Image (tube, helix red, strand yellow):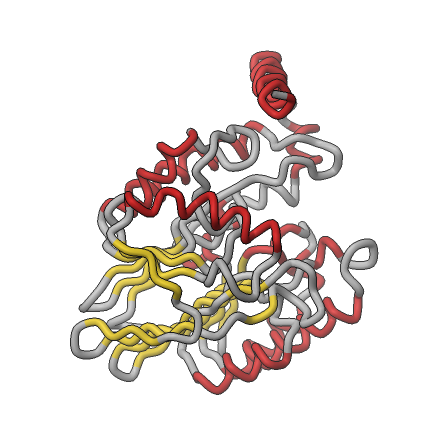
Amino acid sequence: MLKKIKILPIASESLGVRSMCSLVETPDISILLDAGISLCPYRFNLMPHPLEYQAIAELRKRIQEVAKKVKIITISHYHYDHFTPSHEDWIVNWTEAEISAQRVYSGKRLLVKSPFDYITRKQKKRAKKFNKLSNKFQSIEIADDKTFIFGKDTELKFSKAVSHGPEDNSLGWVIMLFVKFENEKFIFAPDVQGPMSDNILNQILSYNPQLILIGGPPLYLSKHIVDDLKINSGIKNMEKIVRKIPLTIIEHHILRDKNWRYKSKRLFRQAKRNGNRIITAAEFLSKENKLYEANREELYLKMPPSKKFRNWVDKVLSKKRSTNHH
């Protein structure tokens, strides 16, 4: 699909964790996008399954290894599955205080979503805590609505802050990334949830990329948390994307529903009708989908956690409660 721009998913829902971390390379530059990873602490009233912890441990290490080879890392927004925080957390983020963050970001040039504008209170607090590490970075630059040129032909264009899902959402804002090298174009559109927003859809279609990596709508939240009209809006807008863009890598929220493929079958029909394709990040890598969170109930039934694992969870939770109490 693309010959000069190379995309390599590093961690993702289809690889067993919450993440959209990816490596993008052009002949001029290598960039690590959204170097974060996390697990859902409770789903179906269950803690993450041991397979999920195995995946996050392996992929956290992988992110750190890839980070060593790049000079630039982006942060689209301050949710922990999109950046590595600087606190200890073995339940959700698999992080070792500041060490994990330093292994990823030390000596790097960071291009980040503004920690001041178009941001929720919680994300602003997270960004402020993270920025205390800034003496470890080579530099940290607000990227919203800016374009960066590398070499002769690589253009990184960041969008203005756009909504994390519907326009009236409370989840905040993210920045998308548009990568161009000569006549090749790629879009990274994390957490736009379809997109649900027509404004985001228009930005994506007007750029006319050959490949997009996009976060789909949160089917698993329909009815009880997210209005069905908004979910349907995300699916309808995605139809327009897959109709026009040759290859769509679909990821993130949409894959948290084990029936996602059936529920979005019209997307596949539209893509096929127009000679286009939709695949997950795992499929892009020619790997099997590992939708661990979506299948957590079945995993617990088929592969019950050992006593050793349950004791470890109790110990970690006890330590966390003690730390929070003090």
Q: Position of residue 325 (x, y in %)?
A: 65, 22
Left or right, 165 with respect to 15, comes to right
Q: Quadrant of residue 74?
A: bottom left
Left or right, 133 with respect to 46, comes to left
Q: On screen, 21 above or below 315?
A: below
Please name whichever residue, 244 or 98, is drawn nearer the observer in this view of the structure: 98
Task: Name the residue located 24 percent from the left edge and 47 percent from the top edge.
Answer: 107
Task: Name the residue located 71 percent from the left edge and 69 percent from the top edge.
Answer: 168
Q: How many numbered circles are shown? A: 0
In which quadrant of the rendered image does the C terminus lie?
top right
Q: Is residue 1 visible?
A: no
Q: Quadrant of residue 26?
A: bottom left
Q: On screen, 294 above or below 272?
A: above
Residue furthest toward the bottom?
206
Q: Position of residue 76 (x, y in %)?
A: 46, 60
Left or right, 50 with respect to 94, comes to right
Q: Is residue 90 visible?
A: yes
Task: Name the residue located 79 percent from the left edge and 66 percent from the top edge.
Answer: 228
Q: Position of residue 203 (x, y in %)?
A: 51, 82
Please name whichever residue, 251 or 153, is drawn nearer the observer in this view of the structure: 153
Task: Name the residue located 65 percent from the left edge and 41 percent from the top edge.
Answer: 295
